[in-house]
Image (cartoon, rainbow, N blue to C red):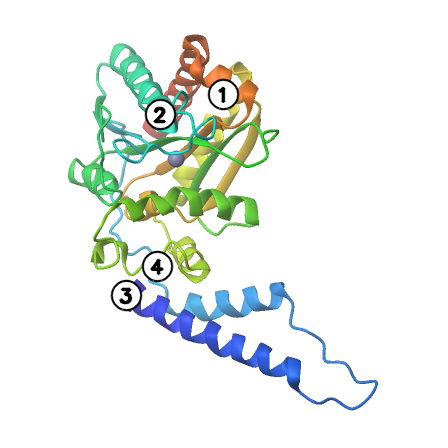
Amino acid sequence: MNVRISARILIELMSIYNMYEKRKKYSFLPRGLTQKPIGNFAITVFVVTILMCFMPSAKFPQRKIDKIQTIVLDAGHGGEDAGAPGIKGSREFLEKDITLDLSLRLGKLIEEKMPDVKVLYTRKTDKSVKLWERPNFANRNEADLFISIHCNANNNPKAHGSETYFMGLHVNEGNLDVAKRENAVITYEADYKENDRYGGFDPNSPESHIIFSLVQNAYMNQSLRLSSYVEAKTGKISQIRSRGVKQAGFLVLWKTSMPSILIETGFITNPEDRKFLASDEGKNTIAKGIYEAIEDYKAFVEKS
Ligand SMILES: [Zn+2]
């Protein structure tokens, strides 16, 4: 059963549930008898159980990756999609510029220090790259790692720190919000609704986000390991504090057929994080932290 049909079933189930909830408000109950509302947890358990029956598991064939030979670096956003602005209304600090700069610095480090590794970039300039094309590019090139680089944003300027994500079900609203913001970039693509590459994904529908986070990724353990290394290394040497390893349903990670992570390197909306992310020293430190994480991961994979 494909994802589009699963999404349809879920949407139908949710609408039946909503109808039931609305009707319940007007139901006539005997005095003293209160109807116990079904909590969010129960709804989630219900939806997840139903979905587990329909979701394809490990849909994409698993390649045994015992050597890291090709790494795809994916600088988030680009072109007309500027990503999150550091300061509202200003083009001085844009996510797309910081992610590109970071990805080029990281790539240079890998090229210099790991001559046996080929580094490929989804973009090396300020250009638009469709979201589906990013994992596609990695799959076509049989990459052994896919690393998507981003900056976080929040209406609260106090929010700060780095987070590394891998594909999976979000456990809180905060993780879901990050995935929603990053997935919303497909709306820059005029044909995203008709485009079958997104399997009927609707960035405005909460159900879509739940469904996509449930798709099993064959490389979950490896992605978790790399995410942990990234947060440990960057958290140690960078002044941006680590908020840890997290999971959510990111469209850009969805169809990758290799371990894949998305790094939210810091909050571009927080003055201290922004200053660090915009500085040469900050970018070099973050690139070094990610490089060292890749180095440790590569050593682990190649010795085991
Ligand atoms: Zn982003």
Quadrant that contains the N terminus: bottom left
Q: Kindly identify which numbered label has been placed on residue 99.
A: 2
Q: Which residue is mark 4?
A: 57
Q: Earlier in the sequence, mark 1 or mark 3?
A: 3
Q: Compute the Cα span from label 1 to label 3.
A: 41 Å
Q: Earlier in the sequence, mark 4 or mark 3?
A: 3
Q: Are marks 1 and 3 in contact (CB under 8 Å)?
A: no
| Label 4 vs label 3, nearer the camera | 3
Q: Earlier in the sequence, mark 2 or mark 4?
A: 4
As drawn, 19 above or below 160: below
Asked which quadrant contains residue 44, the reply is: bottom right
The location of residue 146, given as percent across then percent down, is 30, 34
- What's the amino acid at mark 4? Ser
Q: Compute the Cα span from label 1 to label 2.
A: 12 Å
Instruction: Sort mark 4 into few (<14), some (14-19) or many (20+) by Cα contacts within 10 Å.
Output: few
Q: Are marks 2 and 3 in contact (CB under 8 Å)?
A: no
The picture quadrant for ligand 1 comes to: top left
| Label 1 vs label 4, nearer the camera | 1
Q: Nearer the viewer, residue 288 or 114?
A: 288
| Label 2 vs label 3, nearer the camera | 2
Q: Secondary structure at mark 1?
A: helix
Q: Secondary structure at mark 2?
A: helix
The location of residue 32, given as percent across then percent down, is 83, 85
| Label 1 vs label 2, nearer the camera | 1
Q: Which residue is mark 3?
A: 2
Q: Is mark 2 within 8 Å of ligand 1?
A: yes
Q: Residue at x 44, y 49 (%)?
A: 168
Q: Earlier in the sequence, mark 2 or mark 3?
A: 3
